[in-house]
Image: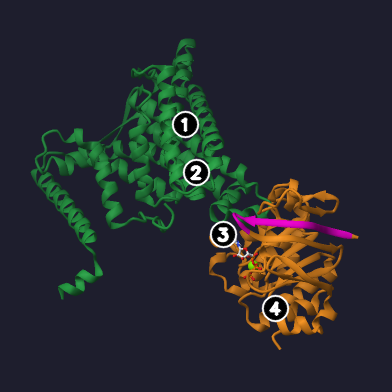
Chain colours: A green, B orange
Amino acid sequence: MFANLRRKYDFTDVLLWLIGGILLIFILYGSIVTLTSGKYTTAQWLNFIVFGLAQGGIYALIALGYTMVYGILGMINFAHGEFFMLGTFGAFFMAEALSATGLLESNWVISILLMLAAAMIVSATVAILAERIAYRPLRRAPRLVPLITAIGVSYFLQYTARGLFGSGVEAFPNVPALAGSIAVGPIKIQNTQVAVFIATAVLLLLLWLFVSKTKVGRAIRSVAEDKDAAALMGVDVDRTIAISFAVGGIMAGAAGVMYGLVFRQVAFYMGFVPGLKAFTAAVLGGIGNLAGAVLGGLILGVIESVGPSLFLEGIGIPAPHQLKDGIAFTVLVLILIFRPTGILGERLSKRA
Amino acid sequence: MALLEIKNLHVYYGHIHALKGINLTVDEGEVVTLIGSNGAGKTTTLRAISGLLKTTEDTSVMYDGIELRQLRPHQIVEKGVIHVPEGRRVFSRMSVQENLMMGAYARKNRHQIADDLAYVLKLFPRLQERRAQHAGTLSGGEQQMLAMGRALMANPKLLLLDEPSMGLAPVLVETIFDSIEQLNKQRGITILLVEQNAQMALSIANRAYVLETGRITMSGNAQEMLHDEKVISAYLGL
Ligand SMILES: Nc1ncnc2c1ncn2[C@@H]1O[C@H](COP(=O)(O)OP(=O)(O)OP(=O)(O)O)[C@@H](O)[C@H]1O
Ligand SMILES: [Mg+2]
């Protein structure tokens, strides 16, 4: 009987399942301990979830860029987090200028629209340039080459930002109109979070309309499925790929504004961790799948926000919230073990 | 008058010299077929014409007074040279309707597009029934009809067909060849047809070329070739 089992699963498979199983047992055990101890009220849990959804909306916007580029080129653009970082700087300088002219106090709607415009233009421009200069010449190269190049682009952009804007953390200007919070029953929602929800929902709707209903969206889908066939339909493949990068950049820029509003800071290294988490979100949802990126972002945001109190405190970890980032990467490992295709995804192994 | 005039076409895949100086012309209104066995270079020829492959500097591909070698694939499509690739290559994740609209991607005039859509759906009623269905779930024959219909949506002047009969049941092969003839006669579309089914191809073509390992070894009137000893023994399998 054991011989039979051994033939079916090799040693590493068993080991991975064992690791996964142990992690799951810890998570379940911790959750039960916390829930039975009654340390947190329902309202507190709901607040965690709302916070997680706001954070997850930001991940979702960034994850869309990873997933679009993956869908169209089969490449993981590790520089995408830096597009987000540079967009946040774009929003930051716009906010500073608006604050200096007083518009940030007097007209917050226009101010946020201007910040969005600045961030989106910066991120999209950088995305287009990165594609044109670094990735396009490598389109026929073996898979590993663009991947390594992307890491190079990532460092290049990070240290360019460091050189230009310094290595410190800058405080993002306050938008007074978004300072308070509203109460929905027992839940307290920050106004900035409300803004994130609305903006994210609008952007996702626009993106969905763009991809599914417009001619350019159809061109993007055709190039993602079969580049030669798309070219034979009269689609300019190079231009369409550039547009996909630009769209990913636009979403990353929007995420930058949200990030600035919620966390009120910018720094040259800030693209790295959210970038990795958005990548995790894209894999969680099923990389290459737009709806998956959104779902993955929201789920990851909630797991991260609920997780430390729910299962880390339960197993007696002293400072659970310090381990928030660890949760995201544990999630990544668990998906890669148990469901490498992600929630909504098709095959990953075939391409990456 | 020659609509397409290829001179000295060379294509390399790395060190493999796949096409070794092909000369070929297609006159306006003609059906010309290019026959040859597996690996002869038929697909390579069509991909070189539509700009998907790089050709050598001394190659010339003149179409309607334009050197196609200078253009990118989507620009060649805009000139009216439409290529139905080997293996159909329909967009499986799009609906039949969306695939047909992809065919009209380079066109602007909505009325003409609507007229052509009506024509295609009349030519292939099967597609009409399955407009909302994902193309990936169509049968092989239906996919071939879709690939042809999609090409017609581009309003082709020169249609490049790569083995439209591949993998189809004999009845369907008849249907497809009937529609090819109809397109040529009724719509005046010039056709360059690549086939392994030499019998069928020669029966509807005006002229034919035989391709063997990257070289044209024979050319001439299609009817005469149907009765040529060498062609019969090599390609008609009698
Ligand atoms: N991408 C490629 N890389 C290397 N060699 C190739 C490539 N594509 C085709 N070839 C080679 O070029 C030659 C011609 O191939 P081509 O596909 O044009 O043949 P074909 O006449 O269309 O054959 P079939 O009837 O089987 O479709 C073959 O020897 C093939 O192996
Ligand atoms: Mg072929």
Q: Amino acid at mark 3?
A: Met
Q: Does label 2 lie on the same chain as label 3?
A: no
Q: Earlier in the sequence, mark 4 or mark 3?
A: 3
Vertical relation: B208 (above or below) A249: below
Tell me the residue at 20%/69% (across/down): A6
Badge 1 marks a residue whose secondary structure is: helix
Instruction: Identify the residue position indicated by label 2 in the image.
Output: A205
Q: Does label 3 lie on the same chain as label 1?
A: no
Q: CA distance from mark 2 to mark 1?
A: 17 Å
Instruction: Identify the residue position indicated by label 3 in the image.
Output: B94
Q: Verify whether residue A301 appears in magenta.
A: no
Which quadrant of the render holds ligand 1?
Answer: bottom right
Q: Amino acid at mark 4?
A: Asn
Residue A60: tell me if it is visible: yes
Q: CA distance from mark 4 to mark 3?
A: 30 Å
Q: Does label 3 lie on the same chain as label 4?
A: yes
**Chain label for disc 3:** B
Badge 3 marks a residue whose secondary structure is: loop
Q: Which of label 3 and label 2 is nearer to you?
A: 3
**Chain label for disc 4:** B
Q: Verify whether residue B3 appears in magenta.
A: yes
Q: Are marks 4 and 2 in contact (CB under 8 Å)?
A: no
Q: CA distance from mark 1 to mark 3?
A: 30 Å
- Label 1 neighbour load within 10 Å: few <14, some 14-19, many 20+: many
Badge 4 marks a residue whose secondary structure is: loop
Asked whether A225 or A14 is in front, the reply is A14
Q: Which of label 4 and label 1 is nearer to you?
A: 4
Write the start and end of the magenta stretch as one range.
B2-16
